[in-house]
Amino acid sequence: MDVRKLLFIIGLCSFIFIPSFCRFISWKNKKVTLLSTLETRNCFVSYVNVGNNRYLVKQKKENRKQIAVVRDALAAYIAKNLKIAHLVDIIAYNISFPGKIHHNWPATIHTIAPGETVRKQRGSKYNALRLKQLWAHASTFEQKGLTRQIINHMTWHKQLPIIIALDLLIGNSDRHCGNLCYDPETDSFCAIDMDDTFNKDLCEIAYKKLFIMLNDPKIVFTSEEITAFVQLRKTLMYLLSHYESRHMIKKMYYFAKKTGFVSGSSLYTPSIEKKLTTYAETITQSWISARKLVKVLETIIKINNKKILGVEDYAWSI
C-alpha cells in the first residue's frame, strides 16, 4: 500500500478511536480574564487568569505557521510524564478566547514555567548552558546535532539528559537559552516552546556521532558523562516503550483535527496535508533511529563501566 494512503488511514482511525486528550484546564463555567498581551517576532503572547490560575496563550502571527500548534501540543504530550516541561493544550480555531488575536485561528494555552529562562539569569552558571542541537545552520557534521560540548553540558544537572533525550526523539533543534527555564528555589528545569519539532531525525545524527566517538581512541568520556549517558538511555527507553510511533501518529492527527485542519476548513490546505504526512514519516523514522541510539549508548556505558569505578547503571530515575 502507498505510504501516504496508509498514513491517511491511520489519521482517519485516530479520529474514531483516540479518546480526547485530558485537558488540564476546564474553560467552561470559569471566568477568564486577559491580563496582558505582548508581540514577539513570530507570536502574540497573552497572559490570562482562568479561575484562580494563571496561564499563557500563544498564537502564531502568520497563517502558514498555524501547524506549529499541532507540533507544540504533541511534544508536550510526550513530555508530560518526564516532569521537565510545561503542559500545553489547544484552543481550536472556532473557539473565541481572551488573548486570541485572530479569533478564527487556533492557539495554544500553556502552564507557566517556574523560574526564568536561563538567558535572563546572568549570574547563574546555567547562563552558559548550551544544549541546542544545530541542524540547518551547522556548517560541518561535527557541529550538527549532539556535540561533544552538549554531552559535557548534560553533566551539569541530573535533569539535562532527560531534556536532551526528549529533544532527540521529537527532533527539537531549538533548545536555546530562551527555551529553557530554571528555578533556583526548586533546583529544577522546565523545557518550553517545542513547536519546531517532528521535522528532522536528530536520533540518527546522534547515533552516527556516538558511533564515531566510540571508535575514536582519542575520545575519553568522564565518569560524569557516562552517568549522563545512563540517564539519556533510560529516558529514551522509557519514551519508546510508552509512546509507540504508531500511537504518536494517531495522536498527531487527533491534534490536527482539534486544531481545525480538517476537510472543509480554510486552514486545511494541500501544504498542511503534505506537512502532516512528512511529520508522520519523520516520527516513524526517528523512533527507528532512537532504538539504534539506545544500543550504541548501551555499548558505550558497558565499555566505560569496566574502566570507571562508582558508576551504577540507571543511577537516576525519572
Image: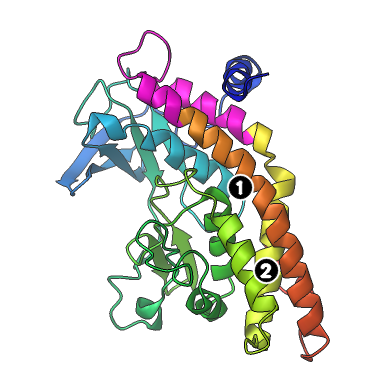
Q: Residue at x 74, y 75 (%)?
A: 300
Please state which of residues 281 and 254 is positioned toward the viewer in this rendering: 281
Q: Which contiguous range is marked in magenta?
A: 248-275
Q: Which residue is mark 1?
A: 286
**Magenta-drawn stretch contains 264:** yes
Give the image location of residue 194, x and y in percent: 42, 49
Q: Residue at x 36, y 81 (%)?
A: 124
Residue 29 seen in this snapshot: no
* Category of crowding for the residue at label 1, using alpha-carbon neighbours closer than 10 angstroms: few (below 14), some (14–19), many (at least 20): many
Q: Residue at x 80, y 81 (%)?
A: 303
Q: Amino acid at mark 1?
A: Ser
Q: Amino acid at mark 2?
A: Gln
Residue 17: quarter of image? top right
Q: N-terminal of the two: label 1 or label 2?
A: 2
Q: Are marks 1 and 2 in contact (CB under 8 Å)?
A: no
Q: Residue at x 62, y 14 (%)?
A: 16
Q: Is residue 182 shown left or right of residue 211?
A: left
Q: At numbered mark 2, what does the secondary structure look like: helix, strand or loop?
A: helix
**Quick check: 96 above or below 287?**
above
Q: Which residue is mark 2?
A: 231
* Category of crowding for the residue at label 2, using alpha-carbon neighbours closer than 10 angstroms: few (below 14), some (14–19), many (at least 20): many
Give the image location of residue 178, x and y in percent: 32, 63
Residue 212: quarter of image? bottom right
**Magenta-drawn stretch contains 35:** no
Q: Is residue 135 shown left or right of residue 49?
A: right
Instruction: Work out how far the residue at label 1 is from the one at label 2, CA to CA, in angstroms.
Output: 19 Å
Q: Is residue 151 shown left or right of residue 105?
A: right
Q: Main secondary structure of the magenta part?
A: helix
Give the image location of residue 81, x and y in percent: 62, 50
Residue 125: quarter of image? bottom left
